[in-house]
Amino acid sequence: MVVAGVTGALAFGLVGLALAAEPATSSGTPAVVVRADDGDLLASVPVGRRGFALSYRNSVYGTRAEDRYTLATPGRFRLVEVAADQRAVLEEYYALPGPSRAAAGDRRNWVSDPAHRMVFRELNIAATDLGERTLHVPGHRPVPLWRLVGDGDPIVVLDIEENPQ
């Protein structure tokens, strides 16, 4: 698997962007699929067209932050929003270009738009106990990704695949 660095993506807690072959299409419902680095299926959560989020503990501030995605073209997803419990995480640590705004009724206190609305086919992330990365899909229970892998190989790969009906 070839992994290319993404400018600014490390600031969002992303390990990198892995380009993969376009998945086969079917009449099924899209699902966020989580695989181990070796390709073993760890989780699959139907996402419909609503999108999903990845929350994690910011390593410097120690508070929760979240990257939010919507589905783009088939098999791809786009980063559309970054949220955090502390405003400083967005404005100082990530240095996002626009002002953050209060997020009443949101899972996080503050939200901001990313500098670039990056589009991914696959996303490699480190699912460590320290970061407590968690997948959030509306209408489903959160999936604590760090509990799906061992400390020796904490890398997981997120992808959008068609879920057979």
Image: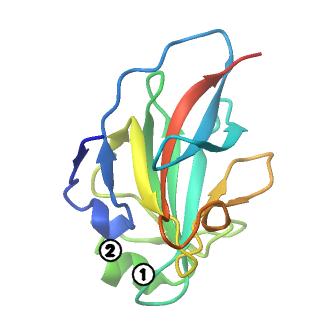
At 39% from the left and 20% from the top, the residue drawn is 22
Gap in angstroms between the C-alphas marked 1 and 2: 6 Å
Is residue 107 shown above or below 4? Answer: below
Give how far across and how far down residue 77 sits, in percent.
46, 37
Left or right, residue 73 beside residue 46: left
Quadrant in the rendering for residue 113: bottom left
Please state which amino acid type lies under the numbered disc 1: Val
Please state which amino acid type lies under the numbered disc 2: Tyr
Quadrant in the rendering for residue 149: bottom right
Give how far across and how far down residue 94 sits, in percent.
32, 74
Mark 1 / mark 2, whichever is N-terminal: 1
Secondary structure state at the residue bearing disc 1: helix
Mark 2 closeness class: few <14, some 14–19, many ≥20 residues within 10 Å: some
At 54% from the left and 82% from the top, the residue drawn is 130
Give how far across and how far down residue 10 sits, in percent.
29, 66
- Which residue, given by chain and number where applicable, does mark 1 sit on? 89
Depth check, front residue: 51 or 147: 147
- Quadrant assignment for the C terminus: top right
**Residues tagged 1 and 2 counted as in contact (Cβ below 8 A):** yes
Left or right, residue 51 beside residue 24: right
Secondary structure state at the residue bearing disc 2: loop
- Which residue, given by chain and number where applicable, does mark 2 sit on? 94
Depth check, front residue: 80 or 24: 24
Depth check, front residue: 84 or 165: 165
Which label number is shown at residue 118? Answer: none
- Quadrant assignment for the N terminus: top left
At 43% from the left and 84% from the top, the residue drawn is 59
Left or right, residue 116 beside residue 62: left
Quadrant in the rendering for residue 32: top right
